[in-house]
Image: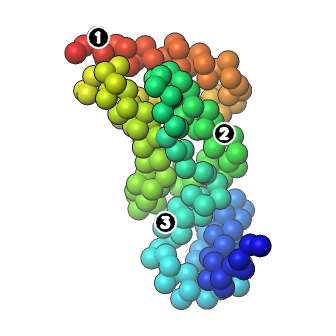
C-alpha cells in the first residue's frame, strides 16, 4: 500500500504544476509569483520559502514535469552501444516535452540572464553528466584519449537532437539516431583519438 503524501509534497506539486500551466499560457516574462500563488491556492510566503525567485521556481517545474534527467546507461563495454543508449534516452526526454513551453523558455533565457544561468546549471548539466560518464568509461578502457573534448561532444549531440525536433520538425526516428551516431558523433571522437 502506497504511503499517503505529506501536505508539503501536495502543495509543492500544485505550485510546480501551476507554474508550468502559466508558463504555457502567458510565457515566462508575464508569469508572476502572485499568479502562481493564486493558481496553486498557496501563499507567496510558502513559495518564497522554497524558491528564492522566479528563475528557480521555473527550473524546478521544468525539471520535475517537462524533462526527465538523462542517466548514464549501465556499462555495456562498448562505446557505440553506450552512446546509443544515451541518445535514445535524450530523444525520449525531448519528445515528451511541450514544444511551446520549451521554446518559450529558450526565448526567456535570452532575455533573463538569471533564468539562463539557473537552467544551464540545473537542467543542461544532466546531458553532460550522462555522456560524460560514458566517455569516462571509454577512456578507462583505452578506447578514447583522456583529452577528448566531452563538452564539444555534448553540445553537438544536444544541438542536433534539439534542432531536428524543434527547428526543422523532422522526425527523430531510429534511423536518424543511428546516422547521427555513425556519421557525426563517432567520427568526431575517432578524430580526437587520432590526434593523441
Left or right: residue 186 versus residue 192 is right
What residue is at 59 percent from the left and 16 percent from the top? 179
Q: Secondary structure at mark 1?
A: helix
CA gap, disc 3 and disc 1:
43 Å
Residue 93 pos. (x, y %): 63, 43
Instruction: For label 1, count other residues whose C-alpha is less than 10 Å away and answer few (under 14), some (14-19) or many (20+).
Output: few
Q: Is residue 26 visible?
A: no
Read off the residue under disc 3.
55
Nearer the viewer's eye, disc 3 or disc 1? Answer: 1
The residue pinned by badge 1 equals 194
Task: Measure the C-alpha gap from mark 3 to mark 2.
Answer: 25 Å
Q: Nearer the viewer, residue 141 or 89?
A: 141
Vertical placement of 66 versus 155: above or below?
below
The residues bearing labels 1 and 2 have C-alpha atoms spaced at a distance of 32 Å
Residue at point 71% right, 85% down?
41
Quadrant where the C terminus sits is top left
Q: Quadrant of residue 66?
A: bottom right
Depth order, front residue of 99/128 = 128
Kindly indicate whether the residue at mark 2 contacts the one at mark 3 (C-beta within 8 angstroms). no
Q: Is residue 17 above or below residue 129?
A: below
Q: Earlier in the sequence, mark 3 or mark 2?
A: 3
Quadrant position of the N terminus in the picture:
bottom right
Q: Which mark is residue 92?
A: 2
Mark 1 or mark 3, which is nearer the start of the sequence?
3
Amino acid at each position: 500500500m502506497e504511503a499517503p503524501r505529506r501536505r508539503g509534497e501536495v502543495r509543492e506539486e500544485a505550485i510546480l504544476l501551476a507554474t508550468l500551466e502559466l508558463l504555457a499560457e502567458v510565457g515566462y516574462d508575464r508569469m508572476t509569483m502572485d499568479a502562481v500563488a493564486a493558481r496553486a491556492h498557496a501563499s507567496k510566503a510558502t513559495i518564497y520559502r522554497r524558491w528564492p525567485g522566479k528563475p528557480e521556481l521555473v527550473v524546478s517545474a521544468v525539471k520535475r514535469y517537462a524533462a526527465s534527467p538523462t542517466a548514464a546507461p549501465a556499462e555495456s563495454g562498448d562505446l557505440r552501444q553506450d552512446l546509443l543508449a544515451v541518445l535514445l534516452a535524450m530523444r525520449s526526454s525531448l519528445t515528451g516535452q511541450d514544444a511551446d513551453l520549451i521554446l518559450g523558455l529558450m526565448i526567456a533565457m535570452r532575455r533573463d540572464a538569471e533564468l539562463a544561468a539557473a537552467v544551464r546549471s540545473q537542467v543542461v548539466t544532466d546531458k553532460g553528466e550522462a555522456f560524460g560518464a560514458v566517455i569516462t568509461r571509454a577512456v578507462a578502457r583505452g578506447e578514447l584519449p583522456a583529452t577528448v573534448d566531452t563538452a564539444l561532444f555534448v553540445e553537438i549531440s544536444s544541438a542536433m537532437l534539439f534542432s531536428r525536433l524543434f527547428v526543422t520538425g523532422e522526425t527523430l526516428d531510429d534511423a536518424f539516431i543511428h546516422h547521427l551516431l555513425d556519421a557525426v558523433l563517432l567520427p568526431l571522437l575517432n578524430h580526437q583519438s587520432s590526434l593523441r
